[in-house]
Image (cartoon, coloured by chain):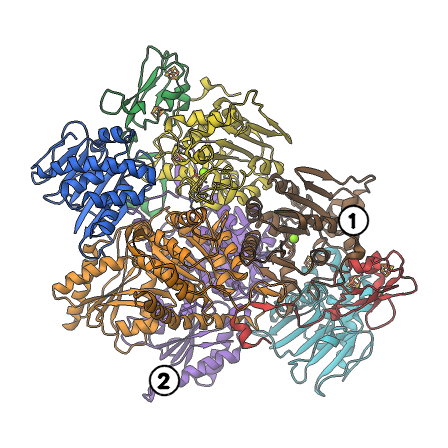
Chain colours: A yellow, B brown, C blue, D cyan, E red, F green, G orange, H purple
Amino acid sequence: MVKIKDLPDAEFVQGSYACAGCGGILAVRLALKVLGPETVIVTTPSCLLGVTTFYPQLAFKVPCVNVTFPSTAAAVSGVVAGLRRRGKKGVKVVGLAGDGGTVDIGLQALSGAVERGDNFLFICYDNEAYMNTGVQRSGATPLGARTTTTPVGSLGRGEERPKKDMLGIVAAHNIPYAATASIGYPQDYLSKVQKAMQVEGPAYIQVLSPCPPGWGYRSDLTVKLARLAVQTGQWTLAEYENGRLTVKEIANPRPLREYLAPQMRFAHLLA
Amino acid sequence: MVKIKDLPDAEFVQGSYACAGCGGILAVRLALKVLGPETVIVTTPSCLLGVTTFYPQLAFKVPCVNVTFPSTAAAVSGVVAGLRRRGKKGVKVVGLAGDGGTVDIGLQALSGAVERGDNFLFICYDNEAYMNTGVQRSGATPLGARTTTTPVGSLGRGEERPKKDMLGIVAAHNIPYAATASIGYPQDYLSKVQKAMQVEGPAYIQVLSPCPPGWGYRSDLTVKLARLAVQTGQWTLAEYENGRLTVKEIANPRPLREYLAPQMRFAHLLA
Amino acid sequence: MLQIRWHGRGGQGAVTAARIFGLAAAVYGGWYAQSFPSFGTERRGAPVTAFTRLDDRPIRDRSQIYSPDYVVVLDATLLESTDIFTGLKPGGIVLINTGREPVMARSPETRVYILDATRLALEVLDTPIVNTAMVAALAGTTGILSLEAVEKAIAAVLSRDLATRNIALARRAYDLAKVLGSKEAIACDG
Amino acid sequence: MLQIRWHGRGGQGAVTAARIFGLAAAVYGGWYAQSFPSFGTERRGAPVTAFTRLDDRPIRDRSQIYSPDYVVVLDATLLESTDIFTGLKPGGIVLINTGREPVMARSPETRVYILDATRLALEVLDTPIVNTAMVAALAGTTGILSLEAVEKAIAAVLSRDLATRNIALARRAYDLAKVLGSKEAIACDG
Amino acid sequence: MLAESDLRKGPNLATPLLSTTTGSWRLVRPVLNTERCNNCLICWLFCPEGCFTRGERVVSLDLDFCKGCGICVAECPREALALVEEGISDARLSER
Amino acid sequence: MLAESDLRKGPNLATPLLSTTTGSWRLVRPVLNTERCNNCLICWLFCPEGCFTRGERVVSLDLDFCKGCGICVAECPREALALVEEGISDARLSER
Amino acid sequence: MRAYLNGNEAVAAAVKLARTEVVAAYPITPQSTIVEKIAEYIADGSMEADYIRVESEHAALAACYGAAVTGTRVFTATSSQGLAYMFEMLHYVSGCRVPLVMAVANRGLAAPWTIWADHQDAVACRDTGWIQLYVETAQEALDTCLQAYKIAAHPEVLAPVMVCLDGYVLSHTEEIVEVPDQETVDRFLPPYRPEYSVDTRRPYVFGVGTGPDLYPAFKYNQQQAMLKAKEVIKEVERDFQAHFQRSYGGLVDPYYCHDAAVVLVVMGATAGTAREVVDELRRQGEAVGLLRLRSFRPFPVEDLRAALSGAGVVAVLDRDCSFGYEGVLATEIKAALYDLREKPLVTGFTGGLGGRDIRREELAGIFHRCLEVVRCQDEGTGAVLNGYWQK
Amino acid sequence: MRAYLNGNEAVAAAVKLARTEVVAAYPITPQSTIVEKIAEYIADGSMEADYIRVESEHAALAACYGAAVTGTRVFTATSSQGLAYMFEMLHYVSGCRVPLVMAVANRGLAAPWTIWADHQDAVACRDTGWIQLYVETAQEALDTCLQAYKIAAHPEVLAPVMVCLDGYVLSHTEEIVEVPDQETVDRFLPPYRPEYSVDTRRPYVFGVGTGPDLYPAFKYNQQQAMLKAKEVIKEVERDFQAHFQRSYGGLVDPYYCHDAAVVLVVMGATAGTAREVVDELRRQGEAVGLLRLRSFRPFPVEDLRAALSGAGVVAVLDRDCSFGYEGVLATEIKAALYDLREKPLVTGFTGGLGGRDIRREELAGIFHRCLEVVRCQDEGTGAVLNGYWQK
Ligand SMILES: Cc1ncc(C[n+]2csc(CCOP(=O)(O)OP(=O)(O)O)c2C)c(N)n1
Ligand SMILES: Cc1ncc(C[n+]2csc(CCOP(=O)(O)OP(=O)(O)O)c2C)c(N)n1
Ligand code: SF4
Ligand code: SF4
Ligand code: SF4
Ligand code: SF4
Ligand code: SF4
Ligand code: SF4
Ligand SMILES: [Mg+2]
Ligand SMILES: [Mg+2]
């Protein structure tokens, strides 16, 4: 279990151009507190790349290898192999992608890397759409959500398909460790990052990271919504370990409305 | 349940340039007996494309849409949408790929199509390696198998990673119907094809289809090995339906050696 | 040719302002017009600019705007981090949304007008979104567009409900600005 | 320049035969050599061809072989479906593995030799793989390569165990073929 | 050879279109003993090339596409099929 | 601006390298009431920009990168943080 | 209808007016708003089409291909990395002779990452067998999309068409656009129903394999069709002109070329700025002209020869670079003029990369440099220009 | 060591001799046997390297990129569809200035499907910022791979290199190859340890994004480095020659060009056949010559000018086509010669597509046609050749 008090003072990402209240950058900031300075980030087009590695604003304090959108995890394999060849032990290699870069265009590369059994951690910060390009739906967009490619109209009712179960998909790869988390539950999230980091072989964490403009809510609600998603049953905190899936039970789920109401993307459902 | 006696006389693929004893072409021939003439095949580079659609030897008797290796299932979605627009109901659209074209380079497109919920059947004829290009390992190559990219030598011990669990991956997509089959069990296989064809939405079948030169065995053993794989527990006949996975139990598994011994690709394991 | 630069922050609607102004001019005002954003990767809160070009003949120039005739500032806090006067044409007009102290022009030829559009917006819309107010204010100050043209453009761009309230806002801003425009130098307080 | 065409079926080792012959010539026989397959998508069982070029100076020509000096047929059943004589140079040699009736040459200038390499192979290897036998047979018939060169090439290409037995086969084929080569026309039965 | 008009519309060609049968690939050939056949259809089902035709009482065999893989022979539960070397009557090769 | 030598080796640049702080983006600003703070570190944990520093008794706040998102204010269990409009002291905007 | 649209909205309007039946696309800046608009049309019921929400651009084009072979009118759009990720499919669909239409909102390619306009993305795809038409205005974007459907499906062409519009500078810039009415468009553009399509009663293999004997013939025909497209593009423009009273010059769009000593060659929106500069210099008495290349593929060799043969210097502005050689247009125009007996000096300028603005002063500077060379030549000194790179 | 290897085996031998540390590749005909051989070396312990078994070519190049930025020597290989599927990554790694080496066993592109050689796959990637060297023999394939590592990592180049060998005709054709010994190779090629690499003590961002202000400068430097590579390629060949006593002419490889009235320009293995034809015609007293283009990128404008300026007719044989224009080499050579005062007639021939064999008679036919034109010109009739397409 990670102790918040024991987290280091040092910030490993700071000065990004993320929107005020960005859940994604918070997810990354927190993960790096656990991962520490001996980490290499491998990342891909997404808000995150846009806001952290666009000269003259380079916000990472650890090495960061940017690669094209479809091949994050493949580049991860390359970095892992290269560091091994260079004899650099103890450096963690962390693939970092948005939901689009993970469950859609980056899925195949991730599947390949997990199958190869390389030693890395892949973190998907999930804001449930393609935010960097203007809030288009992704495979991780939840049923009913309005995005710019699933608009609401006389025929359109928002996203028509349920969210892709990426944890299940990764688990089917017989991955040593995989989990879902939420930035609303940092203790849980960071403990999972720590576990994932210690595991031999590939590990995967998908962390719910709300996005104020993309979801259409006031920026100070980011953490609240990340919590509400769990409390209303819209997001589960699950862990897949030694071939078993455990899901954190929510004793008294709160009414769904509490989660949906503050978000413009669901406004048509409540209207 | 399909009755063998009721299958049509008509052959929908004939005159291919497949090797003598090719399990893949048999898998396709049989499936088409169930699917019938109102079927469109969408296929991709593989032995199958090479042996059936290379002018001047075009062996299909149903329409066949060839597409590039990474995008079989995406083309399937296009054909489905197009036929819907043209008002052509009742035409089955069947994606057909080898294991490489399914579990490796074609995985992402398949994941996308399944997620979209399009109405199609995807058949993966699984010969456990890239045969068309000369027997390189794929994600479906079983642990220990020798291929040209997992050679055996003082350090090499054949394929180092277990076979990708594609049924599990597809099932994690919450697909309406998915199954594994073997050409050694045609009754089971064809009944699954029939079920899959009748289901609304996407369906997936992965059928074990031995390959004499690729596995290194005498061509008359194709069906025997397809049976032995099941009988020795190296291949399961499973079905995923209504969210549940059922696996055909093998009462008295036969010794593994019976399956491995006739195959050159496993010779080093028995040596 | 008249060139306008709009300053705001990501999310404040400067890009929409540039568009509404262009639309009002092009479809309802008898001008040729062109409008475009600053082509950036700006996120919410970051300073952004947008541009409108007007002319009485078709506009073919596709280069960026470096010497605006008018500069409109949707958010006075930008004044601290941004040089809003950059490139302003001699004799140019600067229109700033602020309820505070007037701003000093860089050159004596520049006319700076201020207007507390945020207050207006909070009154009319109950939210501090000032882009339509500033569009109307620019129209009013400069007299280059009629209120009617601005109203029609707002109606065309915003959804029905939003449009009605923004038109009300625009009217108030326009009327105030008309007075402004007739004055010599800095005037203020809507 | 000498050009050789090898006929076989997918899986019978015609491509390897072409290579072994080239290797024997190039590394152990004092020739320059080049060998290549028929560049097809052929599957097991389908007719395939392969080629070897020999010369006493470096070989630069990269075009296909249309007029072979020698044609070697690894499998007599091919005679039914394939015209093995195509392009054969006048005075060329055809060497066929068969235990049956001799084959009629297309032109009086062509010399056709037959050899029951399958029987030899079954005797020596216990399997009807005839490619090394036919390599040796061509060497013997034409005299362009020594048995030693062929043996060394077999040793270099095949795994140790396979090589030993194939060398034994090659020897027998070579000796038989030497006799063949000295004869005028069709001879047979190893 | 294709007609000029076929070439113009690109590599999209009417199917089936078989320039050759694959029977010539065969080194060995299945022969059916109709005496023994009980019409169980196993060969019909398993032949990759679709060489068998169902009959009233027994199956029949068309070798145009038969590649001599031997599956039918191996699978026939009644030993009603055997492989012989193509062209002659002995079955030497089939013994391997 | 980059040195010629940096340009030569392509778009691979030493990091961190921050040309601007993002504090200027802010319309509203959190103010800390050290009286109320009990050093629970919630704000420190949740601030996306890492603006808080842990202290002996209370946290402290550096606004160089603060974008005024309001998360710290919303999450502080002790109401030790409040948002005020940037530049002036009233908190009008924070009331929305 | 007089509307105020940006280039992307103009493209979306065309796609709707063309009664496109299947759309498959993947988001990328600055293309995304095209398909967002289309999604909106479909959601509000104003357009009847299937929108396939694919997981990548390779899949987008594969889905379009699948739909196209069933005989439906299809559309996709992309930019930059997305276009590059489609590269395999680009060759494939043109080889399959499928009449697709794709809008490309041009943007530079990584690395370094950029989201801004240049022509590298599309220019680098010039060998793929796609027709490439570059537009100057939002109006032309709309009109060219309509034309593109007709060109692509012309039975003697059967080639996919890319309509290229500069990212942001066109894609995100609003201006006045005359949106034609549906009836006229319907008259101009009949429904797409090809000679053969996926049909179980008449089975085809789409995209067969073939050997060295036939492959060259297929490719020959593809090349002939692309050359034929030069005529067809002009023909379709005449037809378009008849229906809509607008036209753009077909393959090339010359502006004061006939008597120009210096002609600047550009593609895309820069032409607009250049027109202003030409007018200005003409007012000053300088014999300068502009040639906008509208059709980059097929490459209008004959038209270029005709338009440029009289010039003293041809200045070619490339928003792209074939690394290790030079700007692509410069190379290709030199080759086109190679056989002329009297040829102009051709000199390349590289600019506008990764969104770098191309200013009037810079274009004027190019003209002035070239005019000087012309003067020197007249005086017999024959100075040679060196290509200039806007850094 | 005198060995008998085909082109693919020769490449694999070079990769091993270069002490390559990471290999990532995906199978495709006719490339596969290269990496199969490497897998064998690793399995039998004769080569120490990581072999990453990727799931696609896009991933192959991404994995190579990841390994390369850690400062290791890497290799990949592909063909045709695989190269096309890497296209996005091709631009990316060159933009990132990563010194990769890739072998391309050239093969035509679908559709129609083919597995046989032409140059369309690599030629269509000429703008990607990769150095492209085309080889004539298996020996040259081996030697060029060794050179490629040195060229790519040269601090003033830092560009990835493609070594292109014709599918089958080279990749699957055995011939005599002199395999150098490890010691000499080690002397020629020191280990690769770049100035900066992934290092937690000195963190870098690899592949930053950047705006319109800087993007052009990065690209300018990339272009300058590619132009600089012309010198470096020659320099490395001289160095290679000193170590191994073999060389190939650097950028271009002229054969009887100096006094030729007709020069044929080719790339790849066809040069061998053409040499035979030149010899034959020379014996008959015809002034013909051959120019093999070894470095296609960087494009050796100066060397081509020097070698071709004296010819009457330059016949360019393209195994590729830029659909809607013409053969790519023809275009580019015309452009290169454009500024010559006295220039040869340049005429393009398209052949060898999709594996079509190029026969001696056909090459002789091209020479004869061109010789006739030269004769007509001498007589002042000035006939113009029309490009011929081998159908
Ligand atoms: C091949 C390719 N296609 C499309 C894009 C455009 N693109 C860049 S970021 C992005 C969306 C990223 O979405 P996600 O991964 O969910 O991250 P987010 O921006 O939402 O944080 C897209 C579509 C690209 N860079 N490359
Ligand atoms: C993008 C791309 N990469 C590689 C290939 C080469 N290729 C063609 S078929 C094939 C192997 C197919 O393997 P599989 O899908 O298992 O089918 P099989 O041949 O084994 O039946 C490969 C690698 C290709 N056509 N396209
Ligand atoms: S759009 Fe959303 S994900 Fe992107 S930076 Fe802003 S808040 Fe973060
Ligand atoms: S190699 Fe295997 S899969 Fe391919 S045709 Fe032959 S038997 Fe079938
Ligand atoms: S398998 Fe044997 S018994 Fe059964 S139908 Fe065939 S030949 Fe007759
Ligand atoms: S031998 Fe094989 S191909 Fe021939 S009939 Fe029997 S099963 Fe069919
Ligand atoms: S959250 Fe509030 S109480 Fe806790 S440390 Fe921060 S300011 Fe203090
Ligand atoms: S307002 Fe937001 S950015 Fe500023 S300190 Fe609070 S949490 Fe951090
Ligand atoms: Mg996202
Ligand atoms: Mg396979």
Sort mark 2 into few (<14), some (14-19) or many (20+) by Cα contacts within 10 Å.
some
Given residues H356 and F4, the one toward you in this image is H356
Q: How many neighbours does mark 1 have within 10 angstroms: few (below 14), some (14-19), or many (20 or more)?
A: some
Residue type of the residue flagged with mark 1:
Arg
Number of numbered discs visible in the structure rendering: 2
Residue occupying image coordinates x 68% and y 41%: B240
Is G372 left, or right, of F36 in this rendering? Answer: left
User: Which element is circle 2 on?
Assistant: loop
Query: Which chain is mark 2 on?
Result: H
Q: Which is nearer the eye, G326 or G305?
A: G305
Q: Find residue D99 and report its image quarter.
A: bottom right
Chain of the residue under the numbered disc 1 shown in the image: B
Which residue matches tag 2?
A: H383
The spot of residue D3 in percent (x, y) is: 63, 76
CA gap between label 1 and label 2 equals 72 Å
Residue D73 visible in the displayed image: yes
Q: Secondary structure at mark 1?
A: helix
Q: Amino acid at mark 2?
A: Ala
**What residue sits right under mark 1 in the picture?**
B227
Q: Is residue H180 visible?
A: no
In the drawing, what numbered circle is on residue C60?
none
Residue B154 appears at what percent x and percent y?
Answer: 67, 45
Q: Residue at x 56, y 37 (%)?
A: A165
Left or right of A187? Residue F48 is left
Front-most of D52 and A195? A195
Q: Nearer the viewer, mark 1 or mark 2?
A: 1
Figure quadrant of the N terminus of chain H: bottom right
